Image (cartoon, grey):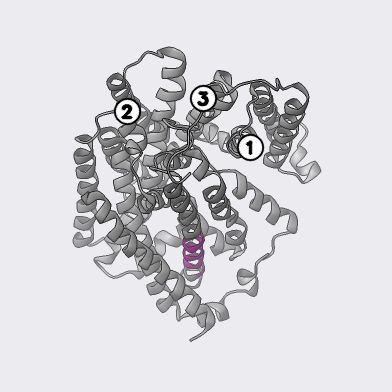
Amino acid sequence: MHWYELAIYSVSAVSVLTAIAIAVLAYRFFKQ
Amino acid sequence: MHLFDLIGLAVYFVVLILIGYLSSRRIKTSDDFAVAGNRITWPILFATLAASFLGGGASMGRAGKSFTDGYVFMFAACAFPLATVLAGLFIAPKLKRYVGAHTVGDVMAHHYGAPSRLFTGLFSLVYCIGILGAQALAIGTVFNAILGIDVSTGILIGMAVVVLYSTLGGMWAVIQTDVLQFLMLAIFIPITLVIGLQQAGGAEALIARLPDLHFSIMGDYSTGLFVSIFIAYLLGETLVPPYTQRALAAPDSRNAKIGYTVAGLFGFVFYFISATIGLVALVLFPDISPDRAMPELIRSALPIGLTGLVLAALLAVVMSTADSYLNSSAVVFVRDIYQSFIDPSVGDKQRLWIERGVTLVIGVGAVIFALYATSIIDALLLSYALWAPTVLIPFVLAVLLDLNCSRAALWAMLSGAAMTIIWKWGPFELEQLTGLTALIAGVLTNIAIFSVVYLGLRDPFEPPHSPAPTSTPGG
C-alpha cells in the first residue's frame, strides 16, 4: 500500500474510532 | 435525493428537537442554561468543543481551498488546532479558578473591572451574532447544494430546529446535540473520503493526476502570505466566547485541560480529512466551483441511504457551530450587559427566562439578517478581525500572569481596535504598503500599549475587581 493511502486510511480510522470511544463515554455520562 | 435519505434526515431533525425538549426539563437555574451546571466531563467537553469549532470553514471551506490551492492552506490553517492545544495546556486549566464565571467578561471583570467587562461583553455579542448569521447562511447553502431547495427555505428549516432546541434546553441541549453532531461528522465525513478515494482510483491516482504543488507544504504561496494566514488562524478565533464558556463548564481543571487539548488534536485530523476531500473532488469533478467540492462529492459519490446520513453530518457541522454561538450570545448579553449594567439584582429564575427570551430573539434576528440583510452579517463579521487585537491579549495575560490593571487593559483594547480599523479600512492601504495584515498590526499595538501602560501607569496596589478566585480540585 502506498504511504499516502496508508495515511488517509489511518487518519480516517482515528476519526471513526475516536467517535466510537466518545459515543461510549458519552452514553455512560448521560446515563448517570 | 431518494425518499429513504429524506426520511433519515427528518428522523435526525426530530431527534435534535426531542433532545431540546428533554433537556428543558433539567434546566432549573441560569447555571444549568449557561454552563450546564459545571458538570461536563472531558469526553463531553471534547466533543462539544470540536463540534463547535469544526464549522463550515473547517469542512466545506477547507475542501474548497485544497481544491484550488492544494494542502498549503490546510498547513497554514493548522495554526488554529495548534492554538487550541496550547490554550488547552496553559489557559483552560487556569479558567477553573474563576468560580461561578460563565463568560470571558466575567474573567476580564475580575482582573480589569467593569469598563473592560462592558467592552468585552459588547464585542463578544457582536462577534457571536456575526458568526451565527454566517452559519445560518451556511445551513441554507448546504440544503441548496445537496437537496436543491432554495437557500431561504434551507435557512428557515435548519435554523428553526437550532433555535427551538437551544431555547428550550440551553447549554444542556447544546452539548447533547453537539455530541450527536460530533459523532455524525467524525464518522460520516471520513467515510465520504474513503468512498470518494476509491472512485478516484486510489491515492496513487490522486498523486498522478494532480499537480505536485497541491501536495507541497508551501504550495505556490509566498512566505509572507503563508505566515499571515498562519498568524490569522493562530490568534483570530482563539478562546472566543463559546470555546471559553465550554472550558468554564468543566467540573475541574483536569477535565478542562484534557477536553480542550484533545479537541485541538482532533482538529488536525479533521482538517486533513476535509482538505483531502477537496483533492478527491478535484480529480472526480474538476469543473465544479471550489465551494461545492464537499457537497458535490456527498451528492454524487455516495450510495442511496448513506447520502442522507452524510448530508445530516454536513448539516451537523454547521448547526453545532450555530447553536454554540446562539447560546453564547444569550449568555453574554445577560451576564455581561443586563446583569452587570441594567439590573444587578435580577434573580436566578428571572435570569433563566431572560436567557431563553434572548436566545429566541437573537436566533430569529440572525435568520432575518441571513434572509434579508446579508450586508448586516458582513458588517458583523468584521468583528472577526477584531477579537485578537482587542480582547485576546489582555485576557491571556490576565489568566496566565494574574495581572490586575484596568487602565492597561482598556487602553490596549481600544488602541488595538483603532489600529486594526485604520490598518484595514483606513485611507492609506497600509496592508499593501507594509505587507503586514491588520490583525498583526492590531495585536502588536495591543501588546505594546498594554506593556507601556502596565509598566508605567499601573497602581501597584490595585486589587482584583471581584472576589478572589479559589482553587478547585485538580487545579
Between disc 1 and disc 3, whose residue precedes?
Answer: 3
Residue B386: image quadrant is top right
Q: Residue at x 35, y 50 (%)?
A: B44
Do we see residue B374 in this rendering?
no
Queried whether the magenta region covers residue B169, the answer comes back as no
Q: Position of residue B84 (x, y in %)?
A: 53, 50
The three-letter code of the residue at mark 2 reads Ser
Q: Is residue B37 left or right of residue B433?
A: left
Report which quarter residue B201 is drawn in: bottom left
Tag 2's secondary structure? helix
Mark 3 lies on a secondary structure that is: helix
Secondary structure under badge 1?
helix
Amino acid at circle 3: Leu
What are the residue bounds of the magenta stretch?
A: B268-279
Q: Which residue is mark 1?
A: B401
Q: Is residue B199 left or right of residue B434?
A: left
Q: Which residue is mark 3?
A: B122
| Amino acid at pointer 1 | Leu
User: Does residue B49 appear in this view?
Assistant: yes
> Label 2, on which residue?
B30
